[in-house]
């Protein structure tokens, strides 16, 4: 129980830090969509998301068919884009905290790994237009 509280507090603290970081003037306006597949306690979880101008949203399906939306804040670096987020899920799952990183693999493809307190660990595959 204590570890879970510490992890949630750490994710929230890093998220507040990201809100204070200025964004590059040439931040990409065209959305970058992705799909995500993960696992939480043996259940397969799914999500689709998109980001633009340093913010993003993800629509996910977690255990027990819980559906939710996460709002994400990205730190746009040249190759890496770490992010944190907060969301809400149905089926009495409640508030979700998330964090992860997306990495540019090629000019038109990026990969990511993340953690969501409802949907668990997930892998991401996305495209850049």
Image (cartoon, grey):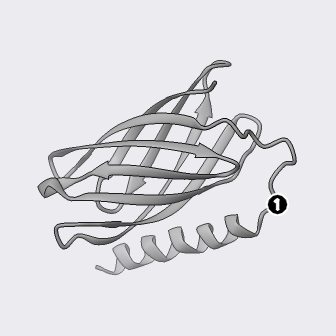
Could you tell me how many numbered marks the image carries? Answer: 1
Q: Residue at x 61, y 38 (%)?
A: 31
Q: Residue at x 61, y 68 (%)?
A: 14
Q: Against 19, is 60 above or below?
A: above
- Which image quadrant is residue 48 in? top left
Q: Residue furthest right?
A: 25
Label 1: element kind: loop
- Which image quadrant is residue 101 in? top right
Residue pointed to by mark 1: 22
Q: Is the residue marked by circle 1 packed among few (<14), some (14-19), or many (20+) residues within 10 Å? A: few
Quick check: 85 left or right of 116?
right
| Quadrant of the drawing holding the C terminus | top right
Quick check: 15 left or right of 89?
right
Q: Against 18, is 119 above or below?
A: above
Where residue 89 appears, x then y in whole percent? 29, 65
Quick check: 89 left or right of 51?
left
| Quadrant of the drawing holding the N terminus | bottom left
Q: Against 60, is 68 above or below?
A: below
Where residue 109 appears, x then y in whole percent? 57, 22
Where residue 84 appears, x then y in whole percent? 55, 60
Q: Residue furthest front?
A: 30
Where residue 18 appears, x then y in whole percent? 68, 64
Q: Nearer the viewer, residue 66 or 40?
A: 66
Quick check: 26 left or right of 65?
right
């Amino acid at each position: 129980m204590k570890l879970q509280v510490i992890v949630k507090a750490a994710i929230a603290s890093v998220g507040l830090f990201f809100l204070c970081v200025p964004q590059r003037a040439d931040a990409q306006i065209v959305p970058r969509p992705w799909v995500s597949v993960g696992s939480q306690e043996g259940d397969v979880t799914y999500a689709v998301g998109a980001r633009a101008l340093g913010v993003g949203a993800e629509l996910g399906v977690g255990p027990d068919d819980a559906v939710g939306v996460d709002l994400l804040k990205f730190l746009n670096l040249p190759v890496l884009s770490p992010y944190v987020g907060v969301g809400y899920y149905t089926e009495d799952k409640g508030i979700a905290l998330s964090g992860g990183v997306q990495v540019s693999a090629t000019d038109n493809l990026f990969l990511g790994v993340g953690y969501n307190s409802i949907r668990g660990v997930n892998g991401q595959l996305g495209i850049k237009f």
